[in-house]
């Protein structure tokens, strides 16, 4: 419990004194209101009914209302070893997650909220750290149970990398066929070739081009996918690649110089832009990433592009801007949904 409490403190939460050691409360003021983490330690044989649980949550709201708070968001975390007993407690509660102290997994039922102001990713990272630490200490007895939930795997990032690699392999066998049919070209866009805005995102000129994009896509993409979710992450990737090509088209029309381009760079830069927003939204840090580090990485990549020949820098800029904006919109929608569900 102490390590979990330190995680709360590291995220700027303050502890509210409680006379009952099994019930702990932590709060933090955000722009949208007051966030409260209500931790129930169910490991010591504690048992409360659903009515008692609901009463406790009402008491929390009353406590803060007396202090003049009007916008209060409460998330319950049940720390337990008997998950079946914990499920009975919060199976009808939308804002209630279970922390399995045996397998160190975060259990979220399909009827419960998928995230709470970024805490899903923070808790999964924390629990995975406990698993890794126990494995390093020789605790291999729980190895089958300690595997991360399959839903937490970056399936979309893996799929996108696989598609890009497969398409490149096909290109090596077919020569210029796919490049002629799918590469980005402003003049060809007007000849019923609008699809090139999408297809060009999955074509790469050479192995180095492919490798550099896929490395960033997998490692940065996995982090962003975990924070946003599979479907929103896919939207960010596609929108960023599309926006990168739109920026490229606008720039080429402005300077009246046209060429042929391909690559996932616009989409990849969009993922980096999304990461920058997420880090900023998480008070400047996610995992080992800080806002300064991410901003520097993006700036350095853009600088390398502007000082190199044959690089579609407009696509990079367009991708970064769209990725940042898309992540901001997605997170805003999630927050609105959470606020709506709390009402």
Image (cartoon, helix red, strand yellow):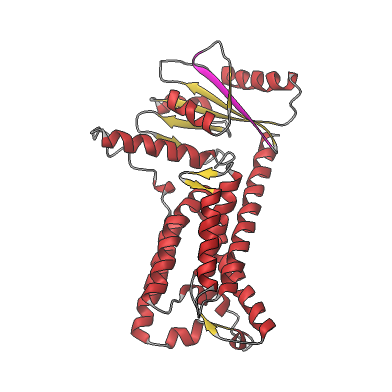
Task: Indicate the position of residue 18 as horizontal and vertical percent values.
Answer: 57, 14
Q: How many marks?
A: 0
Can I make out residue 271 in this image? Answer: no
Q: Is residue 37 visible?
A: yes
Q: Residue 293 or 312: which is nearer the viewer?
A: 293
Q: Residue at x 54, y 67 (%)?
A: 303
Kindly indicate the quadrant of the structure image that contains residue 51: top right
Q: Is residue 286 above or below residue 273?
A: above
The residue closer to the viewer here, 193 or 222, is 222
Left or right, residue 270 beside residue 164? right
Which residue: 62% across, 87% down? 257
Q: Position of residue 68 (x, y in %)?
A: 76, 23
- Residue extending farthest to the front is 307
- Would you say residue 107 sits in the magenta stretch? no
* Of 107 and 210, the residue lying toward us: 210
Specify the quadrant of the image occupied by residue 316: bottom right
Query: Who's the residue at 32% across and 35% down the image?
Result: 133
Give the quadrant of the N terminus.
top left
Q: Is residue 26 inside the magenta stretch?
A: yes
Q: Main secondary structure of the magenta part?
A: strand
Q: Which residues are magenta?
A: 21-30
| Image coordinates for residue 305, horizontal then vertical, percent | 52, 71
Q: Position of residue 73 (x, y in %)?
A: 65, 32
Quadrant the C terminus occupies: top right
User: At 49% from the left edge and 39% from the top edge, which residue is drawn?
Assistant: 122
């Amino acid at each position: 419990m102490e390590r979990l409490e330190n995680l709360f403190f590291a995220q700027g939460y303050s502890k509210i004194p409680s006379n009952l050691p099994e019930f702990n409360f932590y709060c933090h003021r955000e722009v949208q209101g007051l966030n409260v983490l209500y931790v129930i330690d169910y490991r010591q044989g504690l048992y409360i009914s659903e009515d008692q649980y609901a009463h406790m949550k009402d008491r929390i709201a009353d406590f803060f209302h007396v202090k003049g708070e009007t916008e209060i968001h409460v998330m319950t975390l049940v720390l337990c070893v008997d998950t079946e007993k914990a499920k009975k407690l919060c199976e009808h509660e939308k804002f209630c997650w279970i922390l399995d102290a045996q397998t160190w997994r975060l259990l979220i039922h399909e009827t419960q909220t998928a995230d709470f102001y970024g805490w899903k990713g923070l808790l999964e990272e924390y629990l995975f750290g406990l698993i890794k630490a126990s494995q390093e200490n020789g605790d291999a007895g729980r190895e089958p149970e300690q595997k991360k939930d399959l839903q937490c795997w970056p399936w979309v990032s893996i799929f996108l990398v696989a598609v890009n690699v497969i398409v490149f392999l096909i290109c090596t066998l077919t020569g210029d066929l796919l490049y002629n049919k799918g590469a980005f070209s402003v003049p060809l866009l007007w000849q019923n070739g609008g699809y090139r805005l999408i297809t060009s995102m999955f074509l790469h000129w050479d192995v180095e081009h492919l490798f550099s994009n896929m490395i960033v896509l997998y490692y940065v993409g996995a982090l962003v996918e975990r924070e946003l979710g599979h479907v929103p992450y896919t939207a960010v990737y596609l929108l960023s690649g599309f926006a990168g090509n739109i920026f490229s088209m606008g720039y080429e029309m402005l300077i009246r110089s046209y060429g042929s381009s391909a690559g996932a760079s616009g989409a990849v830069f969009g993922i980096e832009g999304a990461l920058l927003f997420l880090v900023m939204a998480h008070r400047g840090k996610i995992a080992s990433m800080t806002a300064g580090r991410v901003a520097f990485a993006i700036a350095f990549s853009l600088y390398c592009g502007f000082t190199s020949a044959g690089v579609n820098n407009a696509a990079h800029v367009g991708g970064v801007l769209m990725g940042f904006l898309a992540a901001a919109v997605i997170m805003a929608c999630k927050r609105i949904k959470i606020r709506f569900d709390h009402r």
